[in-house]
Amino acid sequence: MRDGRTQKEVADATESAVYSAPMSDAKQNHEAMLQLLSPFEPDQRVGFASRRPVKTTGKVAPHYLSAVSAREVWSWIPELWRYEMAKSETLYWILQPLKPDLQLSGDPPTAENGFRPQYFPARNGSVDAFASVPIDLDVGRPGLPTSGAAVGVIADAVQAGRIPAPTFMAHSGRGAYAIWQLRQTVPNTPANRTRWRAIQLKLVSLTDTLGLAPDPNALRQAQWLKLPGTLDTKTQIRVLYLPFMLHGAAPPRYSLDELETALGLLPAPDVPAIEPAPDVPAIEPASERIQRKLRRDKRHGGYVHSARITEIVALSNSRGGMAEGVRHMTLFYYYGFCRAEYACHFPGSGRAHEWAVARTVELNATFAPPLDGAEVMSAVRQAAVPGKLKHWQADTIARALQVAPSEAEALDLSAIAPASVRKRRKEQNQVVAKSRQEAQLQRADAIRALIAKHPKWSDMDIGRELGVDRKTVANHRAQMERTMPDISTAHQRELPGLSE
């Protein structure tokens, strides 16, 4: 792509999108990679892939290439470009940090080892944290705007207050990417995963309303996106990432709370460090106050209630507010979980009721339409029966809130998911765990067989032959030495059946 061509296309599409001083495409892409990788911790890994046929199906798709730590990525980048020049394949990356202890097979591909791919599990479970919310726009097709015009559509929507400004827009060949970067990485916990998913789905809905055709099949946490500067082999166009700036302002970066607020989503409440003022009518106390022992360990039990609070908020946000028929039961459960979570953080404070009521009123205000004050307090009183412990099952909550299996899957719900969804996920996890264990056993047998067949081979030689890490070979060799006697020293000992 010639320098300036994409900038001119964008300028033709909108007069309000302004980019930094003119620079080459290569410089733009380098700056984009620097910023998009800046939130990563040094030990977190960056996943890279290339297009090649899948062995099982023969379909050409992004396939694992290497997972390099953020600390090492820039020293390995030259090898990545040598690979593309040698193989003429489009390169991809995952914008979310992968786990530092990711299971790797072999060393990163270099010219010396023939660019042998380094296997790693490129799946959602490998994501260590969230660093951005990317949306893949299938523009550039008949009846749809071009990738350059898509930037103009986004810019107009931002100025109209219809969508928060993305941090980057990328010309991915024929299509485009819109990327909202987080100011800091957010750990991949169930609660954060639900919030990230709700934000992603809201952005998909908004871009779909704008006529930008977001790809519904590109919504994974470990989603492959084309690498800045790589060649899109379908169009023979270099991929270009551009910072999105309006009127010269710096590209925005967000927290999850800021994105939720900008999108009109209710953020999940955090238990405050300062107790709220008692300005809400108190619930009648129990006849005999229950004495609860303060837990001294870090895990006080509030994680269950926190997960359900977050998922109820995400469910309500995705529906545009709870509708008639489920509003009362939503507030009933929501109050109970808020009160229980506060009590776990501050046992014996006497303030859990006031805080939970305030959060319940906030949630009710987002309903379509909200319940009146008397109905809200009715739901609160039903949930706040003195001295009665609540042990609600996830399936019971799902039925009361009319959570469909498809809805639970889309929002990645777990704590309030139907029994069928939880059962299916459990079975899937068991299958994955079993296949992983079988693969590990097969790999161990192959390593031991090669050690026995070639005792003079080094750990590095065996690792290269099988595509595994040298340390893994060393561990298996040490186990074999501990369990198998060295027969070469047998003549030094008196063994039964041996005569001198």
Image (cartoon, grey):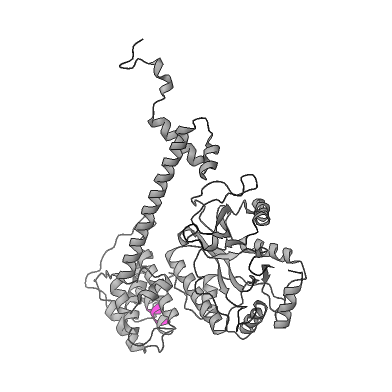
Establish if 324 lies above or below 228: below
Q: Is residue 98 left or right of residue 112?
A: left
Q: Which quadrant: the N terminus?
A: bottom right
Quarter of the rendering containing residue 336: bottom left
Q: Is residue 360 magenta?
A: yes
Viewer-proximal residue among 491 and 380: 491
Residue found at the very far left of the displayed protein: 287
Q: Is residue 122 visible?
A: yes
Residue at the image point whose x is 27% and y is 80% from the top: 382
Quarter of the rendering containing residue 185: bottom right
Q: Is residue 254 magenta?
A: no
Q: Is residue 273 visible?
A: no
Quarter of the rendering containing residue 158: bottom right
Q: How many marks?
A: 0
Q: Is residue 181 left or right of residue 217?
A: right
Viewer-proximal residue among 57 and 143: 57
Viewer-proximal residue among 390 and 131: 131
Q: Which quadrant: the C terminus?
A: top left
Residue found at the very far front of the displayed protein: 58
Residue 174 position, x and y percent, is 63, 73
Establish if 26 lies above or below 376: above
Residue at the image point whose x is 27% and y is 70% from the top: 390
Residue 269 position, x and y percent, is 44, 73
Span highlighted in magenta in the image: 357-362
Residue 90 position, x and y percent, is 62, 62
Residue 3 position, x and y percent, is 77, 69
Q: Is residue 360 left or right of residue 38?
A: left
Establish if 53 lies above or below 144: above
**Does the magenta stretch mainly form a helix, a strand or a loop?**
helix
